[in-house]
């Protein structure tokens, strides 16, 4: 079974929990979205490290990015961009997502390194 398929129930659980916590919020600010994404990143990369056996670091990161992209699309339907008129705001949303996904990629690298150096990930599990 592919790693992404193994993680699908975990992703759905993360999505549902995030939606519940944001249920009463009509709009999410970029800063709030980033904090939630950081928690999702940590959760997903830890699950990937536990479940992956034969995947390389690059393959694991690709799976993580795909899962987090899916998470973003399902959780953050509306990101509030301060000081932007509502009429123009929808045009900017795709650029916000692109920016945040660039940060997600860098954050995955940083978290994996930190987790390895602090003993959260055993060196024998990494490739």
Image (cartoon, rainbow, N blue to C red):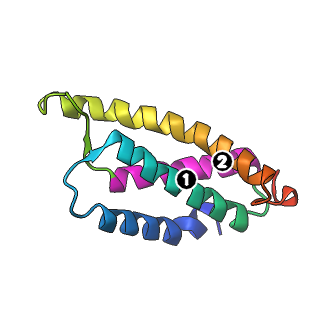
Task: Determine whether 20 is above or below 96 in the image.
Answer: below
| Front-most of residues 120 and 44 | 120
Point out residue 113 in the picture as x, y percentages from the top left corner: 74, 45
Residue at figure coordinates x 51%, y 50% from the top left: 38
Task: Determine whether 29 is above or below 20 in the image.
Answer: above
Residue at figure coordinates x 65%, y 61% from the top left: 46
Judged by its main secondary structure, the magenta piece is: helix
Q: Which residue is mark 2?
A: 111
How far is mark 1 from mark 2, CA to CA? 8 Å
* Disc ID at residue 41: 1
Q: Which residues are magenta?
A: 56-75
Quick one: which residue is furthest to the front in this view? Answer: 118
Point out residue 118 in the picture as x, y percentages from the top left corner: 78, 54
Say if mark 1 contacts mark 2, CB within 8 Å. yes
Residue at figure coordinates x 77%, y 59% from the top left: 121
If the image is split into quadrants, where does the N terminus sit?
Answer: bottom right
Answer left or right for 87 relative to 12: left
């Amino acid at each position: 079974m592919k790693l992404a398929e193994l993680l699908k129930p975990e992703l759905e659980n993360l999505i549902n929990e995030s939606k519940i916590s944001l249920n009463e919020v009509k709009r999410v600010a970029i800063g709030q979205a980033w904090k939630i994404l950081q928690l999702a990143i940590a959760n997903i990369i830890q699950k990937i490290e536990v479940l992956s056996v034969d995947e390389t670091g690059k393959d694991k990161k690709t799976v993580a990015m795909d899962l987090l992209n899916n998470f973003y699309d399902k959780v953050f339907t509306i990101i509030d961009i301060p000081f932007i008129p509502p009429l123009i705001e929808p045009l900017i949303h795709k650029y916000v997502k692109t920016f945040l996904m660039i940060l997600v990629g860098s954050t995955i690298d940083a978290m994996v390194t930190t987790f390895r150096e602090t003993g959260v990930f055993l060196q024998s599990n990494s490739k």
